[in-house]
Amino acid sequence: MSAPTTERDGRHDRTAQGFLRQGERPGDVLRGARTGIRYRHGRRGRCRPSAAAAARRCLTIDLCFGALLPTLARTRRVIAVELQGHGHGHTADIDREMTVPALSADVLALLDELDTERADFFGFSLGGLTALQTAVAQPERVGRLVIASTEYRPDGYYDEILHPVQRWGSARLPSEADFQEMADAYAATAPDPDHFQQLLAKCTATAHSHPGWSDEELRALAAPTLMVIGDTDFVRIEHAADVLRLIPNAELAVLPATTHLQVTRRTTALVPMLEAFLGR
């Protein structure tokens, strides 16, 4: 079976072999044959492709990007990726250390399978680290870069994010309702719903242990970059503002009255911003 993809000029379809299971349609959740990563694929318009990586605390494509994907897919081909352990059955966690470079390699392997040499990247939280790692390590693969609710070094977090037990009840931390929503989404899609807490701990450890990037690496970034955070996010506003100093062609947006988990749901503010940035 096969899933249609679109030629880079958007005028013709061609077939990428090995991605569509029996009964699935283009636009459903699909799976890369070699990587095991599942993704959604929308085929619209004449623009270059975009890739979106799922987040560490939202876990599924629908929960992270469901409010944004329909609009973004109107004018561009969108490949939405669920990272290791996140979401649907074929991204069940595997017996492999979870690292940001490994997640980046997974996404690039999937793009290779889809014969996509270059894409714009939009990553949220752990997905943002994955997208930024890709832009640093493989700059030729990244057109434009959007990193949302993402720190570029461990000191970018507020103290309560690193030590949540000591600051339980902080407005920056997910609420009980937030955790329940994530657990419900995971249970509805994952092969082992009881693995949720272990996966959450694993993803948090991956993000917190990542050393980040040096000033020199950030200054060498070729991709025009948009960083988006909420004013009540995990990431310190001062830390995010440093992207304007460190990354060439960088822009910063701080969404008001917005927590970490609300960033990709602020469609009224975010969609015009993304369309303007990605459309240049």
Image (tube, rainbow, N blue to C red):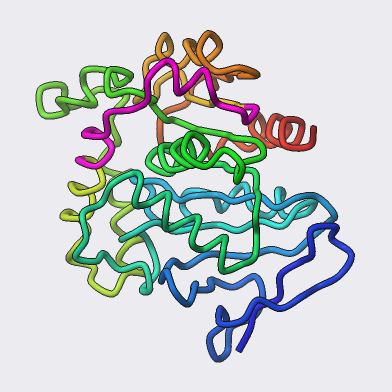
Q: Is residue 255 above or below residue 137?
A: above
* Residue 214 on the magenta span: yes
| Residue at image coords 37%, 41% | 126
Q: Which one is in front, 149 or 217?
A: 217
| Residue at image coords 49%, 73% | 31
Rendered location of residue 189, percent (x, y): 37, 69
Rendered location of residue 140, percent (x, y): 61, 42
Rendered location of residue 179, percent (x, y): 28, 46
Figure quadrant of the N terminus: bottom right
| Residue at image coords 75%, 50% | 48
Figure quadrant of the C terminus: top right
Q: How many marks?
A: 0
Rendered location of residue 259, percent (x, y): 42, 28
Q: Is residue 5 above or below residue 163?
A: below
Q: Quadrant of residue 235?
A: top left
* Residue 201 on the magenta span: no
| Residue at image coords 80%, 50% | 47
Q: Is residue 2 left or right of residue 86?
A: right
Q: Which one is in front, 65 or 22?
A: 22
Q: Is residue 250 left or right of residue 201?
A: right
**Range drawn in magenta:** 205-224
Q: Is residue 82 left or right of residue 67?
A: left
Q: Quadrant of residue 77?
A: bottom right
Q: Quadrant of residue 37?
A: bottom left
